[in-house]
Image (cartoon, rainbow, N blue to C red):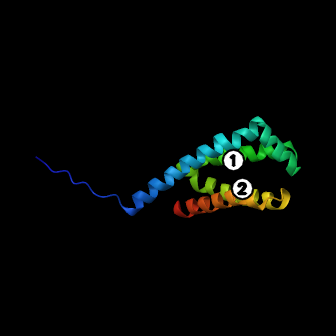
Amino acid sequence: MTAIAHSAPTTGTIRNRILWTLQIVLGLFFIIASGLPKLLGEATAVHVFQQIGWGEWFRYLTGAVEVAGGLGLMIPRLTRAAAAGLTITMICAAATQIFLMHAPATAIFPLVLAVIFGWIVTERR
């Protein structure tokens, strides 16, 4: 009989699992719940972007950036670039909420996401 040694997961392994879980969950969120509604013309997305006043092209651009970022979070070679891009996108979203929509309370969620994406960028270096 041979004994199989089971080693406890290291801090690096746990951190890697947490990062991949976050990346997959956030990637799916940005594809399904955030980007696609903008690209497909969901009524709420259309209304919000009409309030911003930059035209339909901006809604399509934002949706495409979010879908691409969501996909990039789940592709190992693209993770850092996608997280960096989404960090910038979330900072711009927060600024839009504060300065154009005059709703600073709604800027909290994109700012929290920006911090998470920034953490992913630093951890995936």
Amino acid at pointer 2? Thr
Residue sitting at x 58%, y 56%: 80
Horizontally, is 15 left or right of 80 in the view?
Answer: left
Q: Is residue 85 above or below residue 38?
A: below
Q: Percent from the top left, x then y, of residue 56?
A: 85, 42
Residue sitting at x 27%, y 57%: 7
Q: Quadrant of residue 5?
A: bottom left
Q: Secondary structure at mark 1?
A: helix
Q: Which mark is residue 114?
A: none
Between 50 and 65, the one lying in front of the other is: 50
Between 33 and 16, the one lying in front of the other is: 33
Amino acid at pointer 1? Glu
Determine if residue 74 is in view.
Answer: no
Residue sitting at x 62%, y 45%: 29
- Whether tag 1 and tag 2 are in contact, CB under 8 A, the answer is yes
The single residue placed furthest to the top in the displayed view is 40
> Which residue was labeled with disc 1?
66
Within 10 Å of the Cα at label 1, are there few (<14), some (14-19), or many (20+) other Cα atoms?
many
> Which residue was labeled with disc 2?
89
Horizontally, is 18 left or right of 4 in the view?
Answer: right
Determine if residue 30 is in view.
Answer: yes
Q: Secondary structure at mark 2?
A: helix
Q: Earlier in the sequence, mark 1 or mark 2?
A: 1
Horizontally, is 8 left or right of 25 in the view?
Answer: left
Residue sitting at x 67%, y 55%: 86
* Distance Cα–Cα, label 1 vs label 2: 8 Å
Horizontally, is 108 left or right of 52 in the view?
Answer: left
Q: Percent from the top left, x then y, of residue 54?
A: 88, 49
Q: Quadrant of residue 93?
A: bottom right
Q: Quadrant of residue 36?
A: top right
Q: Percent from the top left, x then y, of residue 52?
A: 86, 51
